[in-house]
Image: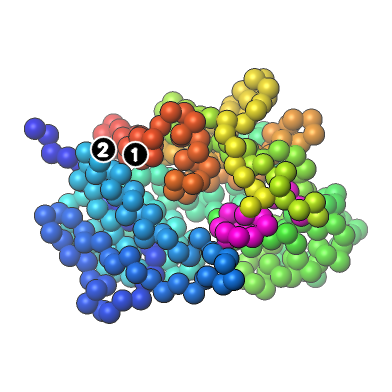
Amino acid sequence: MPEKPRITIVFNELIMEPEEARRFAVEAGKAMALSSSSNINSIVDNVIDLSEIGVIEEREKMCEALQRKGYDASVFNVNGDIKRLIKYLEETKIDLIFNFCESIKGLAINEMHVAGIYELMGVPYTGAGSLALGTCLNKVRTKIILDAYGIPTAQHILYKKAEEISLDDLRLKFPLFVKPSREDASIGIENSSVVYNPESLRQRVTTVITTYNQPALVEEYIEGRELNVAIIGNEQPIVLPISEIDFSKLPPDYPKIVTYNAKWVEGTAEFVGTVGTCPAKLDPAIEKKVCDIAKKAYKIMEIRDYARVDIRLDAENTPYVLEVNPNPDISRDTGFARSARAAGMTFEDMLAKIVETALGRIRQ
């Protein structure tokens, strides 16, 4: 009987435990999961920041789901200690890492560096390679690449300081959308990110630069429908049923965007007012155009195994790529999982499909 593939879910979530509880142990080839307890300071007035809690529990659920599909699965929390991760990789036989490590020391750019460690150590892993992870994190570079291939993106400009703003050479039309140029997970995106005049533009650019210590990306705001296009595969990637963000329940004075609150903070008007629906009701010709553009962006950015491409349709139903998201969140309540369900997959099926897609690529 063939041996079960050994899969380790690797993620990074800082927890507060005694030193002895932080050590990993290898027992029969498995990593001992760290305790699920963590310091949670994010629950205030019934508002819960889901980006900061529940991560460990969710990864454990994924581990259990993979075990039910017949894999020898375990979890490993980097807990901010790269040397600990390297030691684990040296001492443990792993067929595949399910890579959920999105940052180290609070820096998103370190996502690509962790993937680089896997590559240097010859350990196979799911999802995009280190170069693709770093490129997609740089929103301006991604836009330049997509533009070069004729894929529509919003017109943009990059500001390193607010003093650079000049109406004389500002070729963009208000309203404008201001966001950090090197973040993901909607970090730095608030209702005030959509600006309507030069003064609010300067204020928001200043806020982004000083708060996130990086240039501010300013784009023309595209009013219209927002679509999440989930893709799985490599040589012949498939598009899952398209999910749409329903903004109809947002307060009328809120911009129709997916803010940090909308994505992560339960109890906020943005969270309640941005509901995902799947499949999106699209004209077949428009749906085909969206799918073709999403798959083209997927291949151009050299994505592997799975990703989510976010697209906006303007008033003329022209698709504009907002972002290409390698290794997107695939928790049960996310847009990716919603699309998988609409395709007839259970949560376990979806995880197994990603694993088998990665293993198939590695075996070639």
Q: Which residue is mark 2?
A: 69
285 and 95: which one is in front?
Answer: 285
Q: Which labelled disc corresponds to residue 348? A: 1
Point 58% across, 65% down: residue = 47
Q: Is residue 363 above or below residue 123?
A: above
Element at label 2? loop
Rendered location of residue 122, percent (x, y): 26, 50
Rendered location of residue 169, percent (x, y): 87, 56
Q: Is residue 354 above or below residue 179?
A: above
| Residues shaded magenta | 254-271
Q: How crowded is the residue under tag 2: few (<14 C-alpha within 10 Å), some, or many (20+)?
A: some
Magenta-colored stretch includes residue 315: no
Rendered location of residue 101, percent (x, y): 40, 57
Q: Quadrant of the C terminus?
A: top left
Q: Is residue 64 above or below residue 225?
A: below
Point 8% across, 32% down: residue = 1
